[in-house]
Each structure stands twice: as C-alpha cells, then as structure tokens.
Image (cartoon, helix red, strand yellow):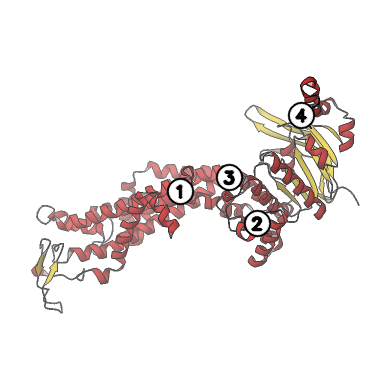
C-alpha cells in the first residue's frame, strides 16, 4: 500500500466569537490508511467533530481552516471547487452523525433520502436506485425493506434510524466513513448492535473508519489506532494496545482512569461481595 | 378516505371550512346549470323587483314564460341570484390566483433571503419594510389608477398586499431549518446547495405557507370587493361580488338585496377560507402530534 488514504498535518481551525477569534483546533495531525479503523477520542469541545467537518469543507465560511498538509488519496483536500467538493462528499468521505433523528429529513420518505444519494453519485434511474436502496437497507439490518422504504423517519425507532443513516452514508460507497459518535444518542443494547454493524461493514467493504467518540472502552474493541485530543490539541496518538498498556501522557492516563470498571467496584466493597458472583 | 375523515374530524373548523368552500366552488363552477337566468339579461320591465317575485321575461328574450327571481332583480332588471353565482367565478378566481401569486413570490423571496443571507437578505428585508410602511389601500388605488383596471392588474395588486407575510414566515423557517442536522447531513452526502434548498428545506416550510395562503385568499376576496366597491377595482361590466356591491350602493335603502346578497356571499366564502386556514394551522402544527 502506498501512502495513507487521509493525511492531515498541522490542522488549525479558528472561529469568530463576540469576544474575538478563538482557536478551536490547533496544529493537529493524523492519518488514516485504507481499511483502517482509527479512533479519535476526547471530551466534549476538544475539537473532534469540528476537525471532521473541516475535512469536508462544511464549516461556516467565517471559520478559518489552515493545514500544513491535507490530502485524501494523494489529492489536496482543501481548495477544491464546488463540483469537486460534491464529488468528495458522500462518494469519498461519508459521515454518520450522532443524532439520527436530526440527520433525517422528517418530510421525506426513507426511500427518497437514500435514492437521492444513489441518483446523484451514480446517475441511477429511479427503478435501479430503488432496488439498490432495498439492498442497502437489508445490508444494515433493517427488517422488511420494501415496507420501510416507503415510511417516514418518525415511524422508525432510534436504532433503526441510525441504521438508515448508515445506509445513506454507505450509498455513495465511500472509502472513508466518519462515525461521529454514532451511538451516543442510543441506549446501551442498541449501541452494541450499531458498533458491531459498522465494524462488520468496514471489514466487508474494506472501508476506512474514523471513530469519533469519548468512549475509550469502545475504542479498545474496534480501533487499530487511537488519536487523543484535548482542548483543540493533539495529546497522543498510538496503536490501541500500546495506549491502554502504556499511556504516554498524563491526560490519557486520566481518561483511562475515568472508565468505569467492574473490578474497582468490587475492590471498594469486598466484604459484601465476597463469595457472590458479580461478574 | 378514513385518514382524511379522521384528520378533518379532529378539526371541526377545517371540516366546516372545507364544506363551505366546496359548496361555493361547486355552485360557481356549475353556474350554467344551477343559475336560473342569464346574468347579463336586461329586463326594463322587471327593475328592482324584491326577492321571490315573478316577472315576464324581457321582450328580447326567446321564452315567454314568467320567471321567478328568487333573490330579486337589480336596477336594470337582471336576476340577482344568477349574477351572484356567475360573479363568484370572478371573485374566487381573483382570490385564488392572488393567493397563489402572493404565496409563490413570498416563498421565492423568503427562501433566497433566508438561505443565502448577507446582502441579499438585507435587500429583501428592506423591500419588505418598504412594502409594509406603505398604506396598502393608497398604493392599490394609485397603482390601479396608473395601470387601469382589469382582472390581471387587480390580481397582481392583491398579491402585493399579502406576499410580505409569506416572505417573512418562510425566511424565518428557512433560517431555522438551515441549521438542522438533516441539512448538514444532506450536504455531507454531496448535495448541491440549490438541491438542498429545493428538496430538503422548501418542503418543510410548506405547512405555514398553506395556512397563510387560505388567509391570503380570504383577504384577497375582501380587498377585491373593497376596491371594486370604491370603483377602482374591476371594470363595472365584469360581474364580481365587489362590482355588484358597488351597483347596489345607491339602492341600499330602497332595494337592499342588490348589495346585501353579494355581501353575504363574500361573508360566507371568507368565513369558509378563514375556518379552513385556522383548522389547517391546528392540524399542521407538529406540536399537536399526528
């Protein structure tokens, strides 16, 4: 394999506020190889989502984005024409958002929202796009696709909606999927289903995935490498095993320590729990 | 069928409004079938007849049987009921077309200024403010005087009176929908801004526009009547409810039915449109649930 699929070096983003310009992301570098799963972890406001949106040139025009080097598949990421950007968005890089209800248009059927992407990127006819949309819904595990295709977002449960947004993201057959906290708005059992779905799709399609999350425990299961961000700065980037066994930075250690652990509960109340199986 | 019935049953005003408008629309569309006489037939021997009186037809008319004028006749012996039925065609057409024109123009301006913002928004808002600061009736009289009467001119001027409401509402809607997640999501899948506006934003602004359009129609019918009553609206030879009321002005004391009948027709139609608008506003309000 040649160079990385996505390579960003020295990314800085500043935003105007009434109190003057603030630097939301400063000098962040990361890269993703084709087919690789990279986790981006950090607390709220650490600039994770902002960096992801900047990859697609989707920040408001007031935001100032600069990077020493930013390429996707060897081509410059910034400074693209509107036409080139439309080709990049969805076809090369797709995003799955945190809140699936907000990401779906309430007045359009699921079918129309998925086929729209297919028709745009592949110039498919109506019939062809519909049959492809049925395949996509089946692929993300939505039961009874022919019925579901004709329904509106409010007729879906939270987990099903997220599956639909994943199907929409997959419709353009992107080479990089940005999963921006896709499980935060879902309950725990559904979270696990969505995580394993994305993982399965990644393997089957050989697609790269950028997982944005604040859940380190999740990354331990799915990521190859982890990028730790804090207050708009890059703290540490390391292979996932190394990060958990030997975190280099204090902030990373604190993050790791904040993961709720079942053995620590047991350690705090040993007398009562002894003998009974908590695990 | 069941769904439409259930929807209407949840809002009695919408149901009553729909029924009223449907009846008015049916009667005016079927005018040649339901009207008892020719609305233009003059009969000098049957002038100013009160309701429920019979008269022999004019010498120029073919048939020789006496006709019953259910709602009387006007100053030159024309059947008032027939004239109200035929007049409804003009009044309704003017009302509907003015509402459509005002809705379309208001949506266009609202969408563009809300979506692109910046100097376009500033210019559009300035236009709206200028329009609002002008007394409408004065503007209408002035423009109609300059343009001359005529159905098209009246429609344009009526639309001028209501488009700002639509433009303001749509602009606000677009501004709030623009920041919704699904707009951003559509952009991430590679949709062009124009497509996002047409496909994702516009449909979400439709419900308030539909509500406004029914109110705009009621207002247009009223304003047309007012302008015609003042003598600056439609040409007196065009039988609209407004021109008929103008005809009846001189006879309000001696032959009240000439002015009262078209007035009643206006009142009923406007009531229907207003009830429909109010019902739709309640039904389409997402906070009421589905």
Q: Is residue A23 above or below residue B281?
A: above
Disc 4 with disc 3 on a shared chain? no
Viewer-proximal residue among A19 and A182: A182
The reply to whether residue B223 is in sight is no
Q: Residue furthest bottom?
A: B62
Q: Nearer the viewer, mark 4 or mark 3?
A: 4
For the residues bearing labels 4 and 3, Cβ distance under 8 angstroms: no
With respect to residue B248, does B43 lie above or below?
below
Q: Which residue is mark 1?
A: B284
Q: Furthest-right residue in view?
A: A1
Between the residue at mark 1 and the residue at mark 3, the CA separation in whole angstroms equals 20 Å
B101, B188: nearer the viewer: B188
Secondary element type, mark 4: loop
Closest to the camera, between mark 4 and mark 1, is: 4
Say which residue label 2 marks.
A114
Residue at 81% across, 42% down: A222
Whether label 2 touches label 3, CB < 8 Å:
no
Badges 2 and 4, same chain? yes
Instruction: Report the residue marked by disc 3.
Output: B178
Rounded to the nearest whole Å, what is the CA distance between mark 2 and mark 1? 26 Å
Q: Which residue is mark 4?
A: A260
> Residue B73: percent from the left, percent from the top?
14, 64
Q: Mark 4 vs mark 1: tell me if same chain.
A: no
The residue positioned farthest toward the front in the image shown: A275
- The quadrant of the image that shows the C terminus of chain A is top right
Percent x, y of residue B170: 49, 47
Residue B262 picture location, percent across and down: 22, 57
């Amino acid at each position: 394999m040649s160079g990385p699929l996505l390579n960003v070096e020295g990314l800085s983003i500043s935003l105007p506020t009434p109190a003057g310009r603030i630097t939301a992301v400063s000098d962040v570098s990361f890269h993703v190889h084709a087919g690789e799963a990279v986790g981006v972890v950090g607390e709220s406001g650490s600039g994770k989502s902002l960096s992801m949106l900047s990859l697609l040139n989707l920040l408001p025009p007031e935001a100032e984005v600069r990077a020493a080097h930013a390429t996707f598949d060897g081509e410059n990421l910034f400074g693209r024409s509107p036409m080139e950007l439309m080709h990049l968005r969805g076809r090369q890089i797709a995003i799955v958002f945190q809140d699936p209800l907000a990401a779906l248009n309430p007045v359009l059927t699921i079918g129309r929202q998925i086929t729209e992407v297919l028709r745009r990127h592949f110039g498919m006819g109506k019939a062809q796009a519909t049959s492809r949309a049925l395949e996509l819904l089946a692929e993300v595990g939505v039961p009874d696709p022919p019925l579901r295709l004709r329904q509106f977002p409010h007729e879906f449960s939270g987990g099903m909606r997220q599956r639909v947004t994943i199907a929409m993201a997959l419709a353009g057959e992107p080479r990089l999927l940005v999963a921006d906290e896709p499980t935060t708005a879902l309950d725990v059992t559904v979270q696990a289903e969505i995580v394993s779905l994305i993982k399965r799709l990644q393997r089957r399609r050989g697609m790269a995935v950028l997982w944005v999350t604040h859940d380190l425990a999740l990354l331990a299961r799915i990521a190859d490498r982890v990028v730790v961000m804090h207050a708009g700065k890059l703290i540490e980037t390391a292979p996932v095993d190394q990060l958990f066994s030997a975190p280099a930075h204090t902030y990373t250690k604190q993050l790791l320590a904040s993961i709720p652990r079942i053995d620590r509960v047991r350690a705090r109340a040993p007398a009562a729990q002894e003998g009974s199986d908590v695990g | 069928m069941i769904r439409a019935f259930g929807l209407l049953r949840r809002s009695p005003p919408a149901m009553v409004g729909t029924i009223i408008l449907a009846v008015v629309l049916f009667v005016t569309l079927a005018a040649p079938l339901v009207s008892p006489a020719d609305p233009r037939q003059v009969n000098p021997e049957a002038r100013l007849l009160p309701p429920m009186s019979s008269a022999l037809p004019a010498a120029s008319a073919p048939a020789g049987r006496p006709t019953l004028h259910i709602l009387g006749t006007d100053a030159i012996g024309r059947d008032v009921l027939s004239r109200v039925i035929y007049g409804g065609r003009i009044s309704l057409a003017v009302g509907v077309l003015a509402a459509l024109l005002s809705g379309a123009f208001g949506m266009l301006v609202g969408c563009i200024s809300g979506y692109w913002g910046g100097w376009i928004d500033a210019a559009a808002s300035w236009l709206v403010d200028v329009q609002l600061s002008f007394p409408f009736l004065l503007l209408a009289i002035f423009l109609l005087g300059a343009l001359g009467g005529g159905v098209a001119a009246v429609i344009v001027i009526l639309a001028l009176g209501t488009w700002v409401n639509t433009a303001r509402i749509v602009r606000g809607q677009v501004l709030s929908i623009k920041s919704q997640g699904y707009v951003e999501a559509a952009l991430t899948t590679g949709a062009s801004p124009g497509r996002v506006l047409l496909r994702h934003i516009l449909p979400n602004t439709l419900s308030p526009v539909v509500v406004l359009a029914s109110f705009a129609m009621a207002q247009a019918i009223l304003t047309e009547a007012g302008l015609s009553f003042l003598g600056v609206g439609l040409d007196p030879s065009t039988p609209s409810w407004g021109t008929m009321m103008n005809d009846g002005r001189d006879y309000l004391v001696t032959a009240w039915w000439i002015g009262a009948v078209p007035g009643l027709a206006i009142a009923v139609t406007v009531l229907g449109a207003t009830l429909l608008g109010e019902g739709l506003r309640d039904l389409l309000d997402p906070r009421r649930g589905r």
